[in-house]
Amino acid sequence: MSVTLPNRESAELAGPETIRPFRVDVPQAALDDLRRRIAATRWPDREVDPSQGVRLETIQALARYWATDYDWRSFEARFAALPHFITEIDGVDIHFIHVRSEHEGALPLIVTHGWPGSTVEQLKIIEPLTNPTAHGASAADAFHLVIPSLPGHGFSGKPTETGWDPIRIARAWVELMKRLGYERYVAQGGDWGNAVTEQMALLKPVGLLGIHTNMPATLSPEISKGVQSGAPAPEGLSPEEKKAYEILVHFFATGTGYAGEMGHRPQTLYAIEDSPVGLAAWMLDHDVASYELIERAFVGNPGGLSRDDVLDNVTHYWLTKSGISSARLYWESHLAFFDAKGVEIPVGVTVFPDELYPAPRSWAEKAYPKLIHFNTVDRGGHFAAWEQPELLSKEVRAAFRSLR
Amino acid sequence: MTMTIEAGVDIRPFQIDIPQGKLDDLRARLNAARLPTKELVPDASQGVQLATLQAVARYWATEYDWRKVESRLNGLPQFKTTIDGLDIHFIHVRSRHKDALPLIITHGWPGSVIEMLDVIGPLTDPTAHGGTEADAFDVVIPSMPGYGFSDQPTELGWSGNKIAQAWAELMTRVGYTRYVAQGGDQGATVTDAMARQAPAGLIGIHLNLLSAFPTSVGAALFGDTFAMGLVKRAIVGVIASRAEKEPEALAGIERTFRAGYIAEMNTKPQTIGYGSMDPLAMAAWILDHDPDSYAKISQAFLDGQTTGGLSRDHVLDNITLYWLTNTSTSAARLYWENFQNIVAALASGQKPPDIKVPTGFTVFPEELFRAPRSWAEKVYPNLTYFNEAPKGGHFAAWEEPQVFTEELRNSFRSVR
């Protein structure tokens, strides 16, 4: 249905701030083209050592499944059934999923994904969080959920000018929550989602009661400097702190190549735009633990992520041409990933054991003076909502209980 | 004639013959490329610009002719010989002058033997190129393992050190008992390693990049403060603390190590390999080596303005060689191998052996960083030649073959 507007001025008035429903509908030709490209993949020879990156055997298993049995339409049907919207904020169309709980007193919650994630990561927590009584929790635990796509990611618009760093995104999220009419709400994220959520907290907008993070940024300046230069652990660290320190040293020594390339030269990654297998390999190689988890899914021993989970997310990137536009966020941001930022509002922290580093409680207490929840769970890694949706849901409920 | 002499049990003549199907496939892939949105900046600060890459794609898919460079290569004496289980491809051109000095030249990444084609004439036939008979060289130009028509290693260990050992064997095998070696980029790493291994017969080296960084250069420059840790960050940290001394050169090094490709290839060469299986994506990765060569190449494609030897055809000759030999991943693995070596060397705390042979060094002004003489002297105690060339950048032999040739003549004159 088209609406006839009386004149241009009122069209503009109705324009930018309007929230429009959005329908996900991928043309068949795009899917056919994807299959053709996967089938046309030229391969390098096998890696000489497994530590050299995504193994040939793994990516070939992925490509085989992707080009044959994988069914985007089955995912699309589920995805498109959710309430999707788009609204223009600060010149960029922001796509978001907005699911309201049927429980009156539900607490509004904005959940932000990271890289190489998307709203696809968050789908499994929608039900447990909005409909807690069907998932072993009480009506008092209900949330209204807002799950936006970061600018340059998924069905959000791609910025055509520089400046969309996590600080600007945080401002946009505050505006989004305001536009939706939420006057009291909380925010959650890991990875870039944590960076954005923490920046929201630093803005201290009216209405933001507290945040929960599954990738806390807790490093003091001394620890941050030490782990990045690879200096030996300072004296006086507890065993827990020493372990986190050593994991971080290893991460900075061997695990940041992708971030360096995206941070300095995102446009050079034509490979992830031009080649579906190139994109998949780049996205699989985020961190050692999640790579191993995904690898197991493709060689027949799935853990928290299935083959379809992984390919839903990769295909979503491919179809929305988000490879390079998402990488630009690394170029835009000048924030250190793990450094404590001075968040003063209430913070809940959940440590998933296979996350990039296991944040010690002592560091979290210093980084977040109003630490309202801290828990280390027994399983899960970087993609907490995706890998362990029930567990993350439980943590989010517990973290925010005191703020309701 | 040289071919019949050398084509014995161990050394086989080699000719390139790319099936037409592969060239057709390349074109089809170029035409099917899917491109991202334009970068958000008006310059190259986000990487290879869309307009540049589109110009590359257009020329590559239409006017560019691989067969020209193929016949040029086939017009040279090319060979293969198996060393340590790998077939090594090399060009070997003897000078017609009796007392020519044998010289092995090693290319780098993202280069190949194609970088060196225009110096073969001036080096082997000096009287036709402004030199005298006494300046003549016999040249050996190998493809590094994993590069071009050499085999791709299927086992670990092919770092610069091992390649250096293989080159000494290669020179022995072709019958040279007194020779010199030259290199820039990864070729400098290999050449530096040869000099430290000091095989009998190696009487001097010349380098156009202080590339033994960080192990030997770092140790020589920064001594004890060059501590364990992430190589890149350690270097940047140390550099920051010394920046008052040689600010320009240090800033150049810092820029170099900020380039993401080094860290990615050092740690995950296989991952970037999959994307580089598309020709245009591979071209972008190769073009983004350093700001100076990128700007020159970009200009050649966008404005038709060629700097030195970096013409559209030459640039695509090199990229097409990577494509046709399917070597972008195996070439990147050399970074991984060398990184393993660096980490191991730093962990052991052992200094590499000193270099005793006469060493020449030429600074090309548009190189990644302009190494000051004081640095070259610290790293190479027997520095017998040091000069700043009037022009040229990272791909010195390719960009300025005549200048490069004169530098080699001058540098090696004293060891003949």
Image: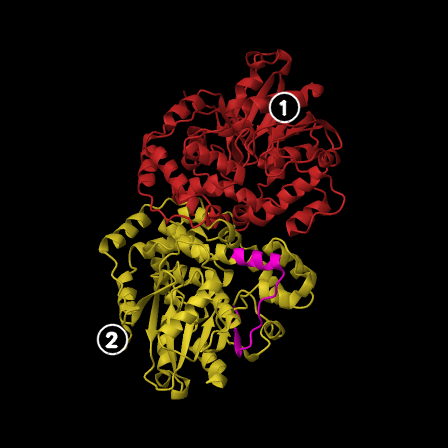
Chain colours: A red, B yellow
Q: Residues within 10 Å of mark 1 (few under 14, many from 20)?
A: many
What residue type is disc 1 on?
Answer: Glu
Residue B371 % position (x, y) = 58, 70
State the residue in front, A7 or B187.
B187
The quadrant holding residue B65 is: bottom left
The quadrant holding residue B175 is: bottom left
Q: Which mark is residue B48?
A: none
Residue B330 % position (x, y) = 41, 54
Q: Mark 1 falls within which chain?
A: A
Residue A240 % position (x, y) = 69, 37
| Left or right side of A207 for B83 | left
| Left or right side of B302 for B161 | right
Q: Is residue B344 magenta?
A: yes
Instruction: Say what secondary structure mark 2 lies in.
Output: helix
Residue A367 % position (x, y) = 72, 36
Q: Which residues are magenta?
A: B339-366
> Cα distance, mark 1 to mark 2?
77 Å
Residue A3 visible in the shown view = no
On the same chain, marks 1 and 2? The answer is no
Instruction: Say what secondary structure mark 1 lies in.
Output: helix
Q: Is residue B131 magenta?
A: no
State the residue in front, A112 or A121.
A121
Q: Which mark is residue A395?
A: 1
Position of the C terminus of chain A, as image quadrant, is top right
| Left or right side of A365 for B6 | left
Q: Relative to B304, is A218 above or below?
A: above
The quadrant holding residue A320 is: top left
Q: Which residue is mark 2?
A: B4
Position of the N terminus of chain A, as image quadrant, is top left
Seen at 56% across and 74% down, the residue is B355
